[in-house]
Amino acid sequence: MKQSHITGITVGSLLAAAALCLGLRHGADRRRAEESRTHLRNHDQTTRAATADAGRSGQAGSRTKPAATGGQDDDRKDARDRLRLLLSTGTGMDRTRGFLQMIAGLKSEDFPLLLADLTAVGLQHDDRSQMALAAWAEIDPAAAVAWAASEPAAGRIWQVGAVEARGDSTAYRGETIVLRTWLANDAAAAMDWVTSRDTDKKSHELQLWALGEWTRQDGPAALAWAQRLSQDAPGSDGRLKKVLGVLMMTDLPRVIEVISHAPQDARAGLITAIGAGAGKLPAAARDQWLAALSDPGLKEAAVAAIISGRNGASADDKLDLLEKYPGAAGMPGTAEIYRDWIKKEPDAALQSLNTLEAGDLRDQAVRVAIDALSWGERCSAEKGLELMNRYPEAVDEITLMTWFTTTVNNAHAWELGLSQIPRVQNDQAQEQFYQEVLRSWLWIDRDSARKWIDNHELPETVKKAMATK
């Protein structure tokens, strides 16, 4: 589209001086572009001349294109030497200016060589690798994304924090750098490429990432696209959920409108999928979201989604919501509230477990509570044991291991931990727990630990192991 787009969209996110970079790209006129291409192909230019040219115009780093026959290794080495000079001469501003001027005149077929050179000189993690790929996306996105999807080095090149870290597992792929530019220029073509990919997990993740990025750029268009493809099963289609999840933060009224017009049997699935994001909304917007859900069951599902989210609403906000909508306490995911509740009001939180009906929800709440009692200021091996004794059906192997860790590492309640090892069903695991607890105790208080060992029956393997400690 426009030469300025790379700096406005991509370089702007990589460099603090975005305005300067934008001006530099606008200054890359036709003469400079042609000069850059001429330098790229002139492999007879000396390193000293390249350095001098870099000082004058910032274009000495124009790379050498290998000759068709003979001397290719020397040509590549010469080009990389000049690239090193360009990126080590002058101030940071000079180097950025020179690099932008250089890539402004490149053709599509030049970029694979440039990216290989950047990797060869140790700049695969540098912002300039991303700038080069984004510039390629401006003139030939299909070729750029094909390279990024197939080039083994691409996965290493793009692991740079300057790429937006939105929590997506695909956030550092080379494809996303190309797609961000391509979506802004021609969203239909970009999405056609994404949806034509295989149906494996990586391709699915990339499709959702692209859809989220498109939604941030043009929410109404992305929503219309997702609704068209999900009309057969709107409540279970991940594409519609992805778009609504992004719009929850930027266009809540539109999300409410979509939910209100969705088929009745699809609403619960949509609300559960996007509801955790409501915890990140300001209080007024969160109230607006809940008020728009007239069905009590859907409202409680929305509250449960907010409570179950690890990020977003504070512990106080979650407790206030649970007090206001008590029916949400019995819904899946709300057991996570006990993690925050125990930190704030441990006695009230533990007492509330008695109000839950026996079943999966209570078992999950008990396990969360025991885990919450294992760390921090509220660490209490005794209270954790009390819960295990009160709700034995909720204690699985992981919960038991968590509790043992508490007794040893955090509470130093060695005798209490040793007294519960018979709970472990596996003999080999029992011996392992005995050795871990006793080893820790011997290290901290050898006399007390040795006295306990002498006065208790232990497996022979444990006795032998502890005899040498």
Image (tube, helix red, strand yellow):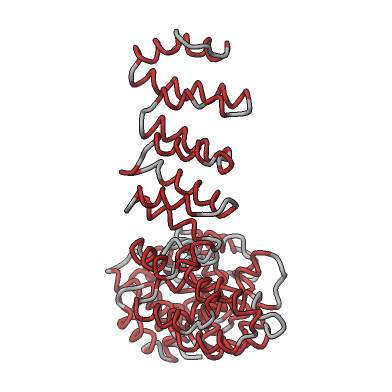
Q: Quadrant of residue 210?
A: bottom right
- Whether residue 17 is situated above or below residue 75 in the rendered picture: below
340 displayed left or right of 113: left
**Is any atom of residue 136 visible in this view?**
no
Q: Residue at x 37, y 38 (%)?
A: 380
Residue drawn at 33 percent across, 18 percent down: 445
Which of the pair 330/216 is nearer the observer?
330
Seen from the viewer's position, the closer of residues 325 and 293 is 325
Residue ranking furthest to the left: 91
Image-based side of 349 in relation to 71, left or right: left
Which quarter of the image is occupied by the C terminus? Answer: top left
On the image, the x and y values in percent for residue 128 come to 43, 69
Coordinates of residue 408 in the picture (x, y in percent): 41, 29
Measured as percent of width and height from the top left, residue 390 is found at 50, 39
Pick the residue in front: 347 or 27: 347
- Looking at the picture, does residue 388 appear above or below residue 268? above
Q: Using the rendered image of the protein, determine whether residue 1 is visible from the camera's viewpoint.
A: yes
Count of numbered marks? 0
Note whether 199 is above or below 355 in the view shown.
Answer: below
Q: In the rendered image, which quarter is residue 32 located in? A: bottom left
At which x and y percent is residue 186? Answer: 57, 89
Rendering quarter of residue 160: bottom left
